[in-house]
C-alpha cells in the first residue's frame, strides 16, 4: 500500500500539479474579476418608460405572470404561463409583435452606446450556460466604445440578457474559464462537462491524499531526526514541496474535494424539491390588469409593471428590475406591506411549521444580501425543510433541506469561504484566500519542478 501511494503520488502528481497551478492562479484572478453577468437593474438601465397612452388592449387573467413593458418604442404584454412558455403581445392591438431582428437588436443596443456590428449567434463563451436557452438565438451587438462592450439581445423578449467588456473577457480567460474547465465546446454538453470535471478532479484528490500521507510518514519530529537534526530529509525544491504540503495540504485537499463536489457526483446532494403541482398552485395565476388609467398616473415613469398573485392575493410590482420594487394592491392600487408567509406551508405538506424569522442580514446559510429581507420558515418534516419567502410578493425564493444545508458545508463554505465573519470584512477574507492560495501555489509549482526533473532523469536512464 505504501509503495502504491508513492507511485500514485509520483506519477499522477506530475500532471495533477500542473492542474493545481492552473486552479490556484485562476482562483486568485476570480477573487477580483467574476464571470460576466448582466443584472436586471443593468439590463433595464436605459429602457424607456411605458407609453401609457398607447395601452389599449388588456390580456385576460390566468397566466402565471403578466408584465407590461416597452419594446422598440411601443408597449407590449409579456405573458408567462404556468406551463413555461412566454407570449409577447402588442398592448395597442393585442396581436403578435414582429420578431426580434437585426434592426431591432441594433436599436436596443444603441441605448447603451454607438453600435459597430450586430450578428446572430446561438451561443458563445459568455452565453453557453443553460439559463440563456429560452432566449436563443441571440443577437450579439459589438459597441464602438472604449470598453470593447459586447451586448447580447434576447430573440424572445428583445431585452439585453448579457454584457461583457474586453477587460472581463481577457481576465476570465485567465480566471473562470480554466478554473471551471469551461471552454464552449465542452460546456455545450452539460453531462459531458460534468463528467470531465469529475474525472479530472477525482484523480487529483488521490494525489492530494497520498501526498499528505507520505508527507507525514517522512517527518521525524522526535529523537530520530535526520542528519543535522532536521525533521525532513529533503533539500531544495523537494524541501519546498514537503513543507508547503504539510502546511497547506489540508486546505488544498478541501479545495480539491469541494471543487469536485461542485458538480455533485452521483447527485448525492440533490435535495428534495417541492412537487411541481404544489409549486404551481402556490404561485397561482395573475388577475387581469385593471384600472390602467389610474395606474398610469401612479406609475408614470415605470419601465416595467408586473401582475402576479394566487387569486386571493393579487399584487402589482412597479419596476421589477429593482431588488426592492414598489408593491401595490392590484384591486385598490394602494401601497401594500409584507404578506403573511403562512400560506407557504402548503409546499411542505408532511411537516408542521415551526419558527418563522425575518432575515435582515446574511447569515451562514444565506449569504446573498441582494434580495434581503426574506422570511425564513422552518418545518419539522423528515427532511427538515426551510423555505425562504419574499415578504412583499410571497414568492418562494429558495427551498433548503438538510441535504442542501450539508452541501453548503462541504462545497460552498470549503470552496469559497463565504463565512459571514470573513466576508463582512473583505480585506480579511482576501488575506485568508491569498495566504492559502500562495501556500497551494508553492506546493504545486515545486511539484511541477520536481516532476519535470524526475521525467528528465527517467528519460536519461532509458537512453
Image: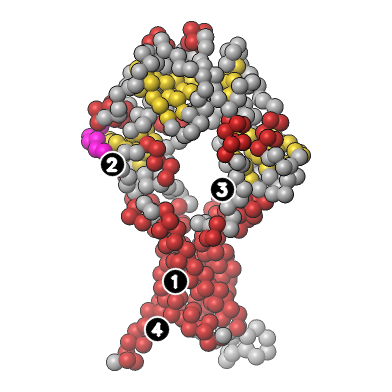
Question: What residue range appears in magenta?
Answer: 113-121
In the image shown, does 302 or 71 lie closer to the viewer? 71
**For the residues bearing labels 2 and 3, Cβ distance under 8 angstroms:** no
Mark 3 or 1: the one toward you: 1
Q: Residue at x 54, y 77 (%)?
A: 210
Prevailing secondary structure of the magenta residues: strand
Where does label 2 land, which residue? 121
Q: Residue at x 65, y 90 (%)?
A: 224
In the rendered image, the residue lying farthest to the front is 277
Mark 4 or 2: the one toward you: 2
Cα–Cα span, label 2 and label 3? 38 Å
Where does label 1 land, which residue? 16
Q: What label does residue 426 carry, if any?
A: 3
Q: Earlier in the sequence, mark 2 or mark 3?
A: 2
- Queried whether the magenta region covers residue 335, the answer comes back as no
Q: Earlier in the sequence, mark 4 or mark 3?
A: 3
Depicted 332 relative to depicted 423: above or below: above
248 sits to left or right of 164:
right
Amino acid at each position: 500500500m505504501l509503495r502504491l501511494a508513492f507511485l500514485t503520488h509520483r506519477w499522477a502528481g506530475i500532471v495533477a500539479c500542473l492542474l493545481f497551478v492552473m486552479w490556484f492562479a485562476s482562483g486568485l484572478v476570480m477573487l477580483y474579476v467574476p464571470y460576466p453577468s448582466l443584472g436586471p437593474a443593468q439590463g433595464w438601465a436605459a429602457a424607456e418608460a411605458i407609453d401609457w397612452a398607447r395601452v389599449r388592449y388588456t390580456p385576460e387573467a390566468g397566466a402565471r405572470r403578466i408584465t407590461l413593458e416597452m419594446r422598440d418604442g411601443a408597449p407590449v404584454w409579456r405573458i408567462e404561463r404556468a406551463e413555461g412558455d412566454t407570449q409577447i403581445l402588442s398592448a395597442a392591438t393585442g396581436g403578435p409583435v414582429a420578431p426580434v431582428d437585426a434592426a431591432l437588436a441594433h436599436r436596443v443596443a444603441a441605448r447603451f452606446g454607438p453600435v459597430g456590428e450586430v450578428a446572430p449567434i446561438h451561443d458563445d463563451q459568455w452565453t453557453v450556460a443553460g439559463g440563456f436557452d429560452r432566449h436563443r438565438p441571440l443577437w450579439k451587438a459589438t459597441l464602438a466604445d472604449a470598453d470593447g462592450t459586447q451586448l447580447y439581445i434576447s430573440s424572445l423578449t428583445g431585452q439585453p440578457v448579457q454584457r461583457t467588456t474586453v477587460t472581463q473577457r481577457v481576465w476570465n480567460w485567465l480566471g473562470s474559464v480554466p478554473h471551471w474547465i469551461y471552454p464552449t465546446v465542452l460546456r455545450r454538453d452539460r453531462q459531458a462537462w460534468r463528467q470531465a470535471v469529475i474525472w479530472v478532479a477525482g484523480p487529483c484528490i488521490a494525489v492530494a491524499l497520498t501526498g499528505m500521507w507520505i508527507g507525514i510518514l517522512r517527518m521525524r519530529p522526535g529523537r530520530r531526526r535526520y542528519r543535522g537534526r532536521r525533521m525532513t530529509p529533503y533539500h531544495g525544491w523537494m524541501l519546498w514541496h514537503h513543507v508547503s504540503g504539510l502546511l497547506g495540504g489540508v486546505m488544498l485537499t478541501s479545495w480539491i474535494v469541494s471543487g469536485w463536489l461542485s458538480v455533485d457526483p452521483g447527485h448525492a446532494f440533490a435535495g428534495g424539491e417541492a412537487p411541481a403541482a404544489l409549486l404551481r398552485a402556490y404561485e397561482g395565476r395573475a388577475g387581469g390588469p385593471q384600472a390602467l388609467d389610474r395606474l398610469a398616473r401612479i406609475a408614470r415613469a415605470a419601465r416595467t409593471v408586473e401582475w402576479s398573485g394566487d387569486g386571493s392575493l393579487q399584487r402589482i410590482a412597479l419596476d421589477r428590475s429593482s431588488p426592492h420594487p414598489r408593491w401595490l394592491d392590484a384591486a385598490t392600487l394602494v401601497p401594500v406591506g409584507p404578506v403573511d408567509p403562512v400560506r407557504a406551508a402548503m409546499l411542505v405538506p408532511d411537516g408542521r411549521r415551526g419558527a418563522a424569522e425575518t432575515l435582515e442580514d446574511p447569515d451562514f446559510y444565506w449569504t446573498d444580501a441582494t434580495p434581503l429581507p426574506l422570511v425564513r420558515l422552518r418545518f419539522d418534516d423528515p427532511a427538515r425543510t426551510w423555505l425562504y419567502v419574499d415578504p412583499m410578493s410571497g414568492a418562494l425564493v429558495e427551498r433548503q433541506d438538510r441535504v442542501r444545508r450539508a452541501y453548503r458545508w462541504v462545497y460552498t463554505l470549503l470552496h469559497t469561504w463565504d463565512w459571514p465573519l470573513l466576508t463582512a470584512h473583505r480585506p480579511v477574507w482576501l488575506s485568508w484566500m491569498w495566504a492559502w492560495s500562495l501556500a497551494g501555489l508553492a506546493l504545486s509549482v515545486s511539484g511541477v519542478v520536481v516532476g519535470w526533473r524526475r521525467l528528465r532523469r527517467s528519460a536519461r536512464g532509458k537512453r
